[in-house]
Amino acid sequence: QVQLVESGGGSVQAGGSLRLSCAASGDIYARKCMAWFRQVPGKEREGVAAIDSGDFSSSFVNSVKDRFTISQDNAKNTMYLQMNSLKPEDTAMYYCALRLSRCSAGGGWNSLPSYKHWGQGTQVTVSS
């Protein structure tokens, strides 16, 4: 069993920053890729960023490049998403996800069906 618990969401004004955390526990030693997705009501869940657990390479959706960074602390089994220069369009529920294949594997890092383990989400609200 894999458990993923997100934290760090909240409400900020545009231009502000937040750091999301995803604490992983359980049968996680075989993990290969961890990612952040986000979703607003009525829209599809969107991949935001991913980090490969082997070589720590990262990938981002274009809309957050140069504003967000992703990192992983293996000693703490925790992944982070540092979000700077937040915009109202970043408002969403943010989910942590884990899969057992590399981020570069079939379908790409943002292939929704490839992730079998998900957290409950943490809400991020950015006001203008």
Image (cartoon, rainbow, N blue to C red):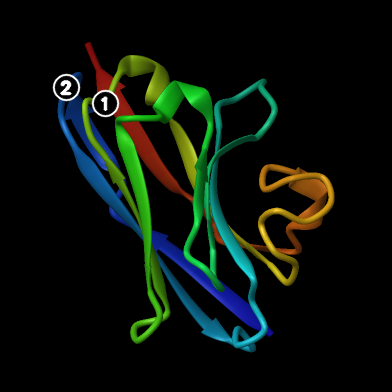
Q: Is the Cβ of the residue at disc 2 closer than 8 Å to that at disc 1? A: yes
Q: Secondary structure at mark 1?
A: loop
Q: Is residue 54 above or below residue 67?
A: below
The type of residue carrying mark 2 is Gly
Q: Nearer the viewer, residue 113 or 43?
A: 113
Q: Residue at x 35, y 36 (%)?
A: 124
Q: Quadrant of residue 13?
A: top left
Q: Nearer the viewer, residue 31 or 6?
A: 31
Look at mark 1 in the image and give the residue it sits on: 86
Callout 2 crowding tier (Cα within 10 Å): few <14, some 14–19, many ≥20: some
Q: CA distance from mark 2 to mark 1?
A: 5 Å
**Residue 8 x, y percent position in the rendering:** 28, 53
**Residue 92 x, y percent position in the rendering:** 46, 31
The type of residue carrying mark 1 is Leu
**Residue 64 x, y percent position in the rendering:** 41, 28
In the image, taking residue 59 as reference, residue 103 lies left or right, namely right
**Residue 43 x, y percent position in the rendering:** 66, 22
Q: Residue at x 75, y 44 (%)?
A: 111
**Mark 2 or mark 1: which comes first in sequence?**
2
For the N terminus, the quadrant is bottom right
Look at mark 2 in the image and give the residue it sits on: 15
Q: Residue at x 39, y 25 (%)?
A: 90
Q: Secondary structure at mark 2?
A: loop
